Amino acid sequence: MTATGTPGTADRGYGPGQAPGVPSLTRQLAEWSAGLRHADLPGRIEEYATSQVMSHLAVLRASLAHPLGRKLVGAFGTPLTADPCRAAQVMAALSSCLYYEDSMYAGHVTHASVGVPLAFRRVQRLNGRALLTAVVAANECAARVTAACALGPLRGQGTSYTQLVGAVAARLHGARAQAGMWTNAWGLALATPPWPLRRALLGSEAKVLSAATPVRTALDACDAAAAGLRGAEDILEHPGGLLAKFSDVPSPEAVTAGLGTRWHTETLTFKLNPAGAYVDAAVDCASQLHARLSREGLHDIEEIVVSAARLTIAMDQEGAPYVDRDRSAIMALNVSVAYNVATALTTGAVVPADLAEPATADRLRWSLADRVRLEYDPGLSREVLRGTAPLGEALRQAGENGRRWLVAVMGEGITATADIAGPPSTTFQKADKAVGARLRVTLRDGRVLTASCGRPKGAAGPETRHGHRELVRSKLASSGTSTEVIDGLDRLASLTARQVDALVTRALSEPLPTAEADPASNR
């Protein structure tokens, strides 16, 4: 296969230690994914994928308008560059830089699963249906491998191997490559998986490479496989393979469970705030209270207490050493409960402009941030574990081993009362993600204002299942996208390859919103 994505063939073989007649996990996944066609997608899955593409374009536009995005374009070029491999790399860097990308159970898959089909749309002549099918195929492959490794030291944006799996699947599905090409490309791409260092991700701008680098590695692996290089087909399940190295409690069965019925694509959470996923509920609470506070009332705040789940507090604590007001790296601001709550109390929302000056130098919001105190709420932690994402389904998949892992990570107390019993789900049609929060604001005159949020807006759950298209249309509009482009993307499945190319090009070319905003503006 050349850089333009022309399909090729590969021998069907078994890797070292793989018994003849027993297909490897990558073989099973490749044979299903390579054969996936648009007609195989339930209507609701096509709708999710369409919203996912729309949301991703909004993220790219927001990043292009941000100072960090402009640095990335200066370093690597624009996402409209003629080389699809370079375009995919640039898009992955842009989509990962603001913590504004969507996620699913399990993983932040969109940097590869959406970015690569968008980058290869022209050379692979992808019409709307072909593009959406490639997105779903990549979603399913990347999310399943990530779910199999979910109980381990790396989660969320730290699982860069997610992009290796997704980028190979996205490119090769668009190329209509045979399954043998997939297994070799995965075997090569996963041979040297990245292990990001938290110090760099939280304390510098290096996080922009956490998705871009593996995406480019995966695309190179596709070219290598096309040239005849062979990878280890049992790269996932081998004792020296990915699952053993990246998971404390591997669940290899998650890779192939319910192919064609257990759609990970419908576990999507659509990000509406450029902030850590575990911070979103606190932001929604603060946005509620903003309407009840005057500008003078903000100065009268004495204390802000955020009741949160263990995962929210842990994420905040990880980033705290790297928060240095306007000198903070973006990732440190993303995961800071104090900064994001103070921002939403001040302005009514958290938007990309809040991750750049003059917002990051706003004295009022930092003064409010200094008054924020986190309080652990075991009830909220239990609700987190009942949900599909981020951990509930992985714990149920792992059974008793999962419970022991949870005790080691969170302690006996929460584990004893957590509702994680039962078999893994056979379908994700009722998937949910409920990382909630409560907010209590005490004013100097003794008044107390409260707000609560059990499931943030955009998180997987019944509201998102029925309203995700409205959410992503609004997200695109906030990025300055014209109504004509938004309406066109709404009809993505019906577009020809020429129309897809023109529409995506226009979506990435229209005038961008300014990243600078009045830090005290009432949005």
Image: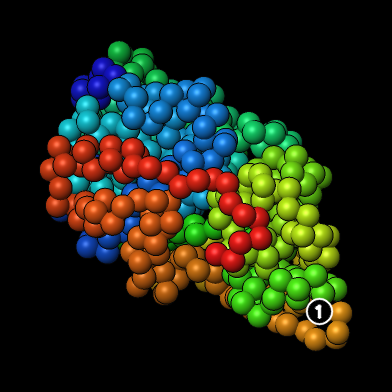
Residue 86 in percent (x, y) is at 39, 23
Residue at the image point whose x is 15% and y is 39% from the top: 497
Q: Nearer the viewer, residue 112 or 54?
A: 54
Left or right: residue 237 versus residue 310 is left
Q: Quadrant of residue 376?
A: bottom right
Whether residue 70 is situated above or below residue 471 in the rendered picture: above
Q: In which quadrant will I find the C terminus?
A: bottom right
Find disc 1 in the rendering and name its residue. Answer: 442
Q: Quadrant of residue 465?
A: bottom left
Residue at the image point whose x is 85% and y is 73% from the top: 302
Dot 1: few (<14), some (14–19), or many (≥20) neighbours within 10 Å?
A: some
Q: Quadrant of residue 402?
A: bottom right
- Residue 434 can be seen in this image: no
Left or right: residue 517 versus residue 416 is left
Residue at the image point whose x is 48% and y is 28% from the top: 73
Residue kind at label 1, given as amino acid type: Thr
Residue 518 in percent (x, y) is at 62, 54
Q: Nearer the viewer, residue 383 or 62?
A: 62
Q: In which quadrant will I find the N terminus?
A: top left
- Residue 484 can be seen in this image: yes
